[in-house]
Image: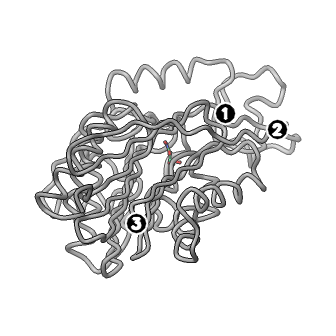
Amino acid sequence: DVSLPMVITTWGSDGFAKATKTAVDATLAGGRMFGLVEGLSTCEALQCDTTVGFGGSPDENGETCLDSLVFDAEGMRVGAVANLHRIRDAARVAWGVMNYTKHTLLVGESATQFAKKIGFFETELTTNETKSWIETWKNQKCQPNFWKNVSPDPSGSCGPYKPSQVFSSNRNREAGYRVEKTNHDTIGMVVMDLNQKFSAGTSSNGARFKIPGRVGDSPIPGAGAYANAFGGAAATGDGDVMMRFLPSFYTVTQMELGSKPSKATHKAIQKILDVYPKFSGAVVAMDAHGHTGVACANIPKFGYNVAYRNGTVKLFQQPCLHPQ
Ligand code: SD4
């Protein structure tokens, strides 16, 4: 097929377009897994929208940690890292987990130790920019955070919250704060190679001001991405909610049962909206015919890129569902 390989990637900005093109070129040069990993790594190096790679989404302690998943539909080979500290190349480390171990997912400091064993160097993932975000956050009167039912200050004055007080006081807590506006720009990618075989994956630095140790949907097989002989899907958005629904697995399963990608992604998003109408996120998918489909919720403008063998990268805008 003259159009293969074909790649679909979440989000529309420049870095994502470059990653999408890189993935096509690298797939031609070295196959679908090489294409996927090179594509994801491109965004990590470019810090796409500052939500991929180093220098983004600091946790409450100000540290940036990375999540990544790589998925090969052929043989269902999967590797992932979550809450990876001080290593920039999350997607390559995820590939290392897939290629050099019998495991699927390595997490935290131990994932860092693994990365060092296979040859990656430790380096700070924080930048002056993330340091300034965390300072601004700390100085805010009400710090948006991921704690539930914990008032920053029981007296209602809304000072800096102290999560450690949760178990040290009998006072009733008011409803807490939830980050309403986080950046949700994880790169999620689906690659179809020359033989119509799929790979899919993600790379993300997660959610801004998350509780340290938090892992999103991105490195979870079936949540962040999934692929089999029928197609592939990848997700982006509020991962704490999305991972409860395995939207990528659901989408691919719907395609396997006969739905077109547009229908399949729509169903996956609708399932989440039925329970969480304010949920914000998107799923992109491609089937073995090269049909693509995208559905999204509560995002003003969801852009995504599709790239083809001849080097063209097309940017599309998907209107999203806004149930409320
Ligand atoms: C997460 N899904 O960690 C990721 C965030 C995201 O675009 O998609 N950002 O929840």
Residue located beneath label 2 in the image = 175
Q: Relative to 33, does residue 213 appear above or below in the rendering?
A: above
**Mark 2 falls on what kind of element?**
loop
Which quadrant of the figure has residue 139? top right
The amino acid pointed to by label 3 is: His
Left or right of 34? Residue 261 is: right
Decide which of 265, 3 is in the foreground and name it. Answer: 3
Mark 1 or mark 2: whose residue is earlier in sequence: 2
Vertical placement of 313 versus 269: above or below? above
Between circles 1 and 2, the one closer to the viewer is 1
Q: Label 3 near label 1: C-beta < 8 Å?
A: no
**Is label 1 within 8 A of ligand 1 (CB to nearest ligand atom)?**
no
The residue singled out by tag 3 in the image is: 289
Which label number is shown at residue 180? 1
Residue at horizontal 46%, vertical 67%? 221
Depth check, front residue: 61 or 80: 80
Tell me residue 83's x, y (percent).
Answer: 41, 53
Q: Would residue 124 be found to the left or right of residue 274 on screen?
A: left
Q: Which quadrant: the C terminus?
A: top right
Tag 1's secondary structure? loop
Q: CA–CA distance between discs 1 and 3?
A: 38 Å
Few, some or many C-alpha atoms within 10 Å of disc 2 (few <14, some 14-19, many ≥20)? few
Question: Which three-letter amino acid code belongs to the residue tagged 2?
Answer: Ala
Is 168 left or right of 123, judged from the image as shown? right
Colouring used for the render: one colour
Name the residue located 60 percent from the left edge and 45 percent from the top edge: 296
**Amino acid type, label 1:** Glu
